[in-house]
Amino acid sequence: MATAAARCQLLLVAVALATLLAGVAGVQLSSRFYDRRCPKLQSIVRSAVAQAVATEPRMGASILRLFFHDCFVNGCDASILLDDTASFTGEKNAGPNANSVRGYDVIDAIKTQVEAACSATVSCADIVALAARDSVNLLGGPTWTVQLGRRDALNASQSAANSNLPGPGSSLDTLITMFGNKGLSPRDMTALSGAHTIGQARCTTFRDRIYSDANVNATFAALRQQTCPQTGGDGTLAPIDVTTPDTFDTAYYENLASRQGLFHSDQELYNGGSQDVLVRMYRRRPSTFFVDFAKAMVRMGNLVPSADTATEIRLDCKKIN
């Protein structure tokens, strides 16, 4: 049973999202889009995600990251799920995604169940959006109303994935600019970065941070260096949040305050710059972080392809019909 504090947090999220849920200009998104055409959709998705997260808690973080990497490249259109074809090179093997993005099999399994319940009705893009929301909530984070009605892209772009996704070595200015290019504010960016309170990362993505950065906690750096050598071991994993890597909470911001951000880009949020005040606020007020994170996820989920982009409802998320 939810605690009074948890119920209060969820109420705050719901109230704060009320003004965001009218849809996107030019795209008719609605929380009730599938109410008649696929009424069991949300229960199918949540049940499958719950099973995946129970088997491997890290999968929740992987699905959340899959959504982010999809939406930041030409909108939330499931282009990241497409395999390469003779006519285009897809996004799966782009620099930020290769040997890194996971969860494709979970989305495929959900799609199979959804197709059995309501064939040729629900987009892969909407499944990813719902799965990301449920992943966060199942690991202890907020929930929010997901707007639905997205459609699936007919192609993908490896070059767009390489150029649109901020890397782990990004500066604060770069992060603000890249999120701003998507219509997301610095506050949205700092809230969404809180997703790093769950999940793991490969040694190659944080090696420079633990060996070269001056603003890193020495004890923390030494801990990470035990399994991430200066050469080799690129794929060795470490938790992004050193304290509670499988719980969606505010420990990420506590880590930043003690100079234990795993990525250079993480620590940029608390390094004498414009986001320090917000990091301190999220440390003190988990409910504020939950509200801001949920609002930012809705805004990011509203990123859609341009109106003239050809789309469809894919029957198989890996390939066009």
Image (cartoon, rainbow, N blue to C red):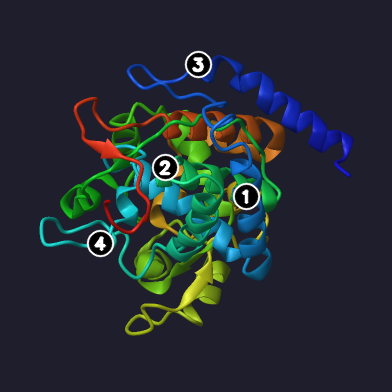
- Amino acid identity at mark 2: Ser
Cα distance in 3D space between marks 2 and 1:
14 Å
Residues at marks 3 and 2, CA–CA distance in whole angstroms:
20 Å
Residue shown at 38% from the left, 61% from the top: 213
Q: Which mark is residue 95?
A: 4
186 on left or right of 144: left
Could you tell whether 7 is left or right of 182 in the image?
Answer: right
Tell me the number on the disc at residue 44.
Answer: 1
Per the image, label 1 sits on a secondary structure element best described as helix
Q: Are marks 2 and 4 in contact (CB under 8 Å)?
A: no
Of residues 219 and 118, the one drawn nearer to the viewer in this rendering? 118
Q: Using the rendered image of the protein, determine whether residue 224 is visible from the camera's viewpoint.
A: yes
Residue at the outermost left position: 87
Q: How many marks?
A: 4
Mark 1 → mark 4, Cα distance in angstroms: 32 Å
Q: Position of residue 106 (x, y in %)?
A: 51, 62
Around disc 3, counting alpha carbons within 10 Å, would you say few (fewer than 14), some (14 to 19), or many (20 or more)? few
